[in-house]
Image (cartoon, rainbow, N blue to C red):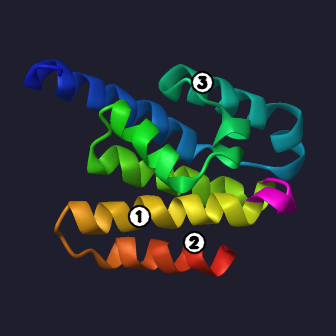
């Protein structure tokens, strides 16, 4: 287990990396040519899994993978936000799976943080609409 200082530093780095990915304005043409590969590379760096893996593993396994990386609730939320943002750009056959994973992430935050958040509820509803 990481000491509190190291864990805080690691979480800050994760927040910055995932935050930078969610700030990117994805463009469908660029997504296919270059943006998808950049996001995939960053996810490999952070999680040791890429988009193809995320599109194929079940939600429970993805949550476990994120927990193994010592994600805090903020990290989980940003990762869920990233999934919501890329869903419309991915192949139609993967959209429902990614949306299901986003729902699982946001529901995990809502349950485990023991804090009610209208923002998280809205994100759950947004993801469920895409399932």
Label 2 with label 3: CB-CB less than 8 Å:
no
Earlier-in-chain disc, 3 versus 1:
3
Q: Which mark is residue 44?
A: 3
- Give yes or no for residue 71 being in the magenta stretch: no
Q: Which mark is residue 127?
A: 2
Q: Main secondary structure of the magenta part?
A: helix
* 115 relative position to 57: left or right: left
The image quadrant that residue 11 belongs to is top left
Residue with the mark numbered 1: 106
- The quarter of the picture where the C terminus appears is bottom right
User: Mark 3 falls on what kind of element?
Assistant: helix
Q: Residues within 10 Å of mark 1 (few under 14, many from 20)?
A: many
Label 2 with label 1: CB-CB less than 8 Å:
yes
Which residue is at 77% across, 57% downward?
A: 94
**Residue 57 or residue 33, whichever sits in front:** 57
Q: CA distance from mark 2 to mark 3?
A: 24 Å
* 93, above or below 11, in the image: below
Q: The magenta stretch spans which residues? A: 90-94
């Amino acid at each position: 287990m990481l000491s509190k200082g190291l864990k805080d530093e690691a979480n800050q780095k994760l927040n910055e990396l995932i935050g930078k990915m969610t700030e990117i304005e994805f463009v469908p043409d660029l997504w296919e040519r270059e943006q998808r590969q950049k996001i995939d590379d960053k996810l490999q760096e952070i999680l040791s899994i890429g988009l193809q893996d995320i599109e194929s593993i079940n939600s429970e396994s993805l949550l476990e993978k994120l927990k193994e990386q010592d994600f805090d609730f903020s990290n989980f939320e940003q990762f869920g936000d990233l999934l919501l943002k890329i869903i419309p750009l991915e192949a139609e056959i993967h959209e429902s799976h990614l949306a299901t994973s986003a729902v699982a992430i946001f529901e995990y935050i809502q349950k485990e943080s023991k804090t009610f958040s209208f923002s998280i509820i809205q994100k759950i509803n947004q993801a469920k609409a895409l399932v």
